[in-house]
Image (cartoon, rainbow, N blue to C red):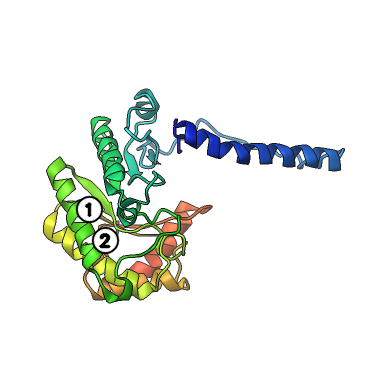
Amino acid sequence: MQLPRTSSAGSVRRLPAQLAVGVLAASALLAVPTPARAADESITVNFSVTNGAPTYRAAGWIYGMTENASGPPDHFYRDVKFRYMRAGGAQLPGSGWVGGNYDRRWNSTLAQARRTAALGGEFILLPHDLWGADGAAISRFPGDNGNWTDYDNFLNRVIADIRAAGLTVQWDIWNEPNITPFWNRPISQYFELWRRTYQRIRAEFPNQLIVGPSCACVPSTNHAFWNQYLDFVRSTNTVPDIISWHSLPGDPVANVAAANATLDPRGIPHP
């Protein structure tokens, strides 16, 4: 769930899209006087059968707070036994580190992390958002032309800010690196980013969890990126604490079984 920002600029930007949808809907009604209807279906739910008490493992949001973390009200989180917030200042103006506007994204991230902790949740940090790789076109990525100085300086800053704030976070190293909106560079360059970042976080915060690869993919023995990633982290001893993927749509039960089928042959432990 992502709540819209309350700035007037954001409202103005969304208006044309809303109007376009309305025009398309009106055109469709004129062109098709008798709309097609789906066949009737019935669903039976047996409320006498239970599978145990709910654990609320998936009760969380990505970008589900206002920029300064003042909204929405607490009950929207507490009512669903809120557990996780995943954020890093995405889409705030200025393109983050690469645009020279890291501070605004960090200040938002810090406010949201503190409120997440106050609500009893865990904060999942998205460094790619702080960098500026949130889907918009950016001028550079970590490690361009073999030069990692800029990224090392960025990582120094993030680590210093996390330590100064006294935060405990999950480090989701880079979002969806297998698709170009978030990683528009060779996969080999991403793997080097992963190795560098993993080793640095382990050295600085040995008790904080590392998450990845957070790919836009479904685990399988045939998925090229998924298997390359597992081979790399296994060979470099950089296996994350939480192995993640984004499957939309997908069946979590089937996806976990498929993931286990790729982890077991490599000797990568899992629940």
Tally of marks:
2
Q: Nearer the viewer, residue 26 or 101?
A: 101
Please name the residue that numbered disc 2 is placed on.
Answer: 240
Could you tell me residue 228's position as x and y percent? 37, 74
Q: Residue furthest right?
A: 33
In the image, is 8 to the left or to the right of 188? Answer: right
Q: Secondary structure at mark 1?
A: loop
Please name the residue that numbered disc 1 is placed on.
Answer: 209
- The answer to which quarter of the image holds residue 269 is bottom left
Could you tell me residue 43's position as x and y percent? 64, 37
Q: Residue at x 18, y 42 (%)?
A: 167
Q: Residue at x 34, y 59 (%)?
A: 174
In the image, is 125 to the left or to the right of 153? Answer: right
Whether label 2 touches label 1, CB < 8 Å: yes
Q: Nearer the viewer, residue 228 or 30?
A: 30
The residues bearing labels 2 and 1 have C-alpha atoms spaced at a distance of: 8 Å
Q: Residue at x 39, y 45 (%)?
A: 93
Q: Residue at x 76, y 42 (%)?
A: 38
When the figure is inspected, residue 5 is found, relative to residue 189, above or below; the finding is above
Question: Which numbered marker is on residue 74?
Answer: none
When the figure is inspected, residue 193 is found, relative to residue 39, above or below; the finding is below
Q: Nearer the viewer, residue 222 or 178?
A: 178
Q: Secondary structure at mark 2?
A: loop
Q: Residue furthest front?
A: 100
Dot 2 amino acid type: Pro
CA neighbours of label 1 inside 10 A, class few (<14), some (14 to 19), many (20+) = some
